Each structure stands twice: as structure tokens, then as C-alpha cells.
Image (tube, helix red, strand yellow):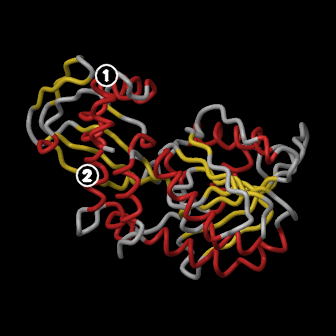
Amino acid sequence: MLKQEQEDGERGLADPNFRADVLTGLAARPRAIPARWFYDRRGSELFEAITDLPEYYPTRTETALLMQIGPQLGALAARNAAVVEFGSGSSAKTPILLRAIHPAAYVPIDISGEFLRHSAQALAGSFPGLPVLPVEADFLRPLPLPGEVSGLPKLGFFPGSTIGNMNAYHAVDLLRAMRDWLGEGARLLIGMDRVKSPDILIPAYDDAQGVTAAFNLNLLERINRELAGTIPVDAFRHRAIWNPDAARIEMHLEAQRDVTFSVDGRAFEMAAGETIHTENSHKYGPNGARMLLRAGGWTPIREWTDPKDWFALVLCEAQPLRTAP
């Protein structure tokens, strides 16, 4: 797999959107590369390892919450719905939802094609008779759903607080696009991480074993492999910081010394201490979460949180748009 990706990069077959985002991001000030490019095969595997870390509370908290509310979801979901999961990853939480609502079809969408196919195959084996229709796509771009689910009621599933990776402007755009893809009357079950103490947040994104650091640094490895990069990966370190003004954790790759390198034939220089901003993870209070969802065209109808109020699952509906209160 890695050898093939390297050969593809050398032949100029890397994803053109990846190339454009990296070159634009490295030339920008401050430098930044969108977090969606973390998820090549290795990045997807590392993220799944992160979800099992003792410091990383979101996955286990959301999973426990899903198991708790399963009977309520079964009563609230439309019969014979198609579940459309955005950014499905390993689909580890999905079986809980599928067992609760017994859907007519399942459509996992992910940017990492090989990882997606492997996960979809495993899930299909656990649910014989359920049509599993994987879509390899970047759900931040226009997205046609499989024809097999046309006419079925839709339940979007967006777990993991992935919405927090986007600033408010892009989050609203994505929510509006999801409304368009799923259609009026559709429902969306979305995970949203709560604001909490930095003493809890920072270790979740900078774990003692260094798995999150490897996940962040793998982005540089991918650039080198797919875009003929010469980035000295060992010259960079992972940083996770809490930005209270923006209510978000930020992940950066910080140069530990002055470096020069090239990507796709273009030369770059970075001074010691300069960073590449690679990810945001916004945290929401209850009112901020509801305002964001409504701005995106979704009306919250039910909300559940864990006993510590660390994480929320919100069920929304794409109700008819109104021009007056």
C-alpha cells in the first residue's frame, strides 16, 4: 500500500485537492493544512488507536451515551430509514445505532477509500441482509448519494464531534449541505463535545504514549510520500493548546529548528518556533450548539448528555424553512 502510494506520488497521481491544499497552506501566513488530510490509511489507523487511549474521553463517552439512549432512538427514527454516516472511519459506534433502529440501508461515507471498504465489509458481515453502500468521498464537497436509497427517509449520523473540526462558517455550510443531501424531513444525529477544563482537554489531544503526536506527524510523512516532499519530519514536534477565546483545542506542528524543504518542486523555509496549524476541535455549550445547528437548517428536537455533561448527542430535523418567527 505505502509503496504504491509513493509510486503514485512520483508519477503525479496524488489527489489534486490534497496537493492544492498543502501548497496553499504552506505558503499562507499563518501556515495551515486542513485536518481532513490526516486520514490516509496510516492516519486512519492511528486515529482509531487514539480513540482507545485512556486520556481520550470523547469516544467512550459517546459510545456509552449511544448505548443508553438506543431504545429512545428506536422510537424516534423513521421506519425503513437509510442511515447515512458522514466520516464513518471504522464505524465502531454504528452497530449500536443500527441495532436500535433497524434501518433499510446503511451508507458510510469516508475520504479514506481502503479503510472505508474494509470497515464496510466487516459491518456487512455483522448485519446480513442489510444493504451496505460505501461511498468514498470528501463530504465537504458535493456528494451524490447511492440511487438505492432514493425515496427512503434519511437519518444522518455525524458522531465524534467532527463538526468541531470546522470553524463556525464552514460548519454551517456543511450542515446546510447535509440538509440538501438528506432532504426536508430528514433527521440528523450529531455528536458535539462540551466545553470543559483544559486539564481534561489537553491530555486528550497530547497523550502520554505519543499516539496523537504520531497522528499529527504522519501528515508530514504523507506529504513526503505523495507530493515528493523533502520535509525533515524529525525537525517538527506535536503541540496541542487550548484557545479559550475561540473555545477550541488547536493542534500544530512546530519547527524545532530552522528548516528548508520542497513539496511538489516548490521550496519552503520555516524558522524555529514557527508552526503549521493542522486541526481545530471546537467545544460547544448547549446554547452555542443549538444556535449552530439552527443556522445550518436543523431544528434540535432531542438532546442527551452523559452524567458529567462532557458530551452531547443531539437529534435534529430538517423542518420546512421559515421566513418569519
In the image, taking residue 222 as reference, residue 143 lies left or right, namely right
Q: Is residue 154 above or below residue 235?
A: below
Hey, which quadrant is residue 144 in on the image? top right
Task: Give, as a three-letter code, the residue at label 1.
Answer: Arg
Tell me the kind of residue under disc 2.
Arg
Residue on which disc 2 sits: 239
Dot 1: element: loop
User: Which quadrant does the N terminus fall into?
Assistant: top left
Tag in front: 2 or 1: 1
Along the line of sight, the residue nearer the viewer: 313 or 151: 151
For marks 2 and 1, the one nearer the N-term is 1
Measure the C-alpha gap from mark 2 to mark 1.
33 Å
> Could you say where residue 237 lies in the image, as x and y percent from the top left?
18, 49
Mark 1 surroundings within 10 Å by alpha-carbon count, few (fewer than 14), some (14 through 19), many (20 or more): few
Mark 2 lies on a secondary structure that is: strand
Q: Position of residue 318 (x, y in %)?
A: 82, 49
Which residue lies under the disc numbered 1? 11
Quarter of the image for the C terminus: give it. Answer: top right
Q: Is residue 241 left or right of residue 273?
A: right
The image quarter in which residue 264 lies: top left
* Residue visible at 62% across and 49% down in the picture: 134
Residue 231, image x, y percentages: 18, 33
Quadrant assignment, res 275: top left
From this viewpoint, which residue is outermost toward the left?
257
Q: Residues within 10 Å of mark 2 (few under 14, many from 20)?
A: some
298 vs 68: above or below = above
Q: Position of residue 89 (x, y in %)?
A: 51, 56
Residue at (43, 48) in percent of width and height: 280
92 over 10 or under it: above or below: below
